Image: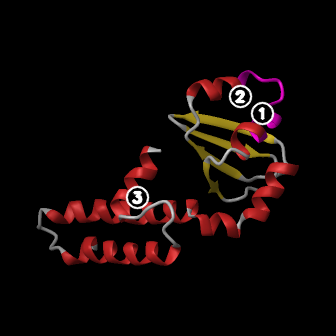
Amino acid sequence: MKRINEYKKLFNVTKDTDLKALKKSYRNLVKEWHPDKFQADDEKAALADEMGRKVIDGYHFLVSINPETLAANADDYKTTISTAGIADFQHKGQVLEISFTDGATYEYFGVSKPLFQKFVNTDKQLRFAKRNFFSTGLTYRKSKRDVEVA
């Protein structure tokens, strides 16, 4: 959640911002922090390089959790959560990353440690995930490209 809020603050957007407004904000930030605007010996050159990377990362991240992107990919997501099993998972902070047997990997934000412990200790993890992660309105995104499953 911290990462989401940090990027929203950087881009000055809200939860319901459309992709067009996000892209406009991205372009303005890229213009502002482009490394070519600063001389190599300028003290802001290093900051510009760092901010440029942060802006690019933030843009890709915010696009991936945008409601328009999620709606466009809803059919693939529904297919994955209804037909594929859970192959692996990791929990770090408030982020749960689940890899599915079809090769897709999704991140779910706002998963508390107690909820994760219940998930780990249940004997039916997929059923638990369907009830507590997939259908509860947690913010999620597809975090990795599909990997071929042998």
Q: What element carries label 1?
A: helix
Q: Main secondary structure of the magenta part?
A: helix
Q: Disc 3 or 1, which lies upstream in sequence? A: 3
Q: Where is residue 17 in the image (x, y as percent from the top left)?
A: 48, 68
Pick the residue in front: 48 or 20: 20
Q: Which amino acid does label 2 sit on?
A: Phe
Q: How crowded is mark 2: few (under 14 residues within 10 Å), some or many (20 or more)?
A: some
Q: What element carries label 3?
A: helix
Task: Look at 29% across and 59% down and name the residue there.
Answer: 50
Q: Is residue 92 above or below residue 150?
A: above
Q: Disc 2 or 3, which lies upstream in sequence? A: 3
Q: What stretch is highlighted in magenta?
A: 119-130
Q: Position of residue 85 (x, y in %)?
A: 83, 43
Q: Disc 1 or 2, which lies upstream in sequence? A: 2
Task: Look at 16% across and 64% down and name the residue there.
Answer: 44
Q: Mark 1 points at which residue?
A: 128
Q: What residue type is labelled 3?
A: Lys
Q: Name the residue under label 2.
A: 119
Q: Is residue 129 visible?
A: yes
Left-right relation of 17 to 130? left
Marking on residue 33: none
Q: What is the C-alpha distance between the residues marked 3 and 1?
A: 30 Å
Q: What residue type is labelled 1?
A: Phe
Q: What is the C-alpha distance between the residues marked 1 and 2?
A: 6 Å
Q: Name the residue under label 3.
A: 8
Q: Do the residues labelled 3 and 1 touch (CB within 8 Å)?
A: no
